[in-house]
Amino acid sequence: MANAILFYRTPSTRILDVADPQALDTTQKLEFTFPDDIMEGINEQYQNNIKQIPIPNQDGARKLNVQENGLQNYTITINGVFEKGGSTLGITRLKEFRVLKQVDTYHQFGIFGIEVDNAPQFNIDPDDTLGFFIQSTQVGYAGVRFNRYDFSVTLGFGGTAV
């Protein structure tokens, strides 16, 4: 993939204060730049909350009513590799991100955002109506080279679906 960043905002670095996520302090972003730290993939999972309700009928007719309950789940999972001891110290930064308070007084649906140069349909910059939070992370070694970590981060979505 092209360059990408995973970043978070604070009440003092809202979109109104720092419009471009690239301009955030380096401690607030995890940058993926080839060849050391690479975001290899991004996957979206979207689930509606639809209930199927069986309707009993004595004459044998089969019928299901459908109840629409809105959005059930929306997650983005990113995965890739970090160079061990690379310029951004990706694993260390990722460990710092996952223990942050995931919401604040302004970003009530999540403090995290993502910006991917060649996949802008996944870009979200958190504000007072939507945002991401870190739902889970996985870290390990990639392949036979002991100087590369592989990782995945699942970001949960909060707010009104886009």
Image (cartoon, rainbow, N blue to C red):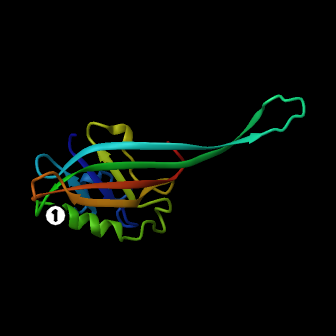
* Quadrant location, the N terminus: top left
Q: Quadrant of residue 83?
A: bottom left
**Left or right: where 70 falls relative to 157:** right
Image location (x, y in percent) of residue 7: 31, 57
Image location (x, y in percent) of residue 114: 33, 50
What count of labels does the image hold? 1
**Left or right: where 157 falls relative to 112:** right
Residue drawn 34% across and 66% down? 98
Residue drawn 41% across and 43% down? 44
Of residues 61 and 38, the one drawn nearer to the viewer in this rendering: 61
The relative height of residue 126 versus residue 101 in the rendered view (above or below) is: above
Residue drawn 31% across and 47% down? 115
Can I make out residue 27 in this image? no
Image location (x, y in percent) of residue 144: 11, 53
Residue drawn 87% across and 34% down? 57
Of residues 140 and 72, the one drawn nearer to the viewer in this rendering: 140
Can I make out residue 77 in this image? yes
**Left or right: where 52 falls relative to 61:** left
Q: Which residue is mark 1?
A: 89
Of residues 85 and 26, the one drawn nearer to the viewer in this rendering: 85
Q: Amino acid at mark 1?
A: Leu
The relative height of residue 73 versus residue 26 in the rendered view (above or below) is: above
**Left or right: where 125 falls relative to 23:** right
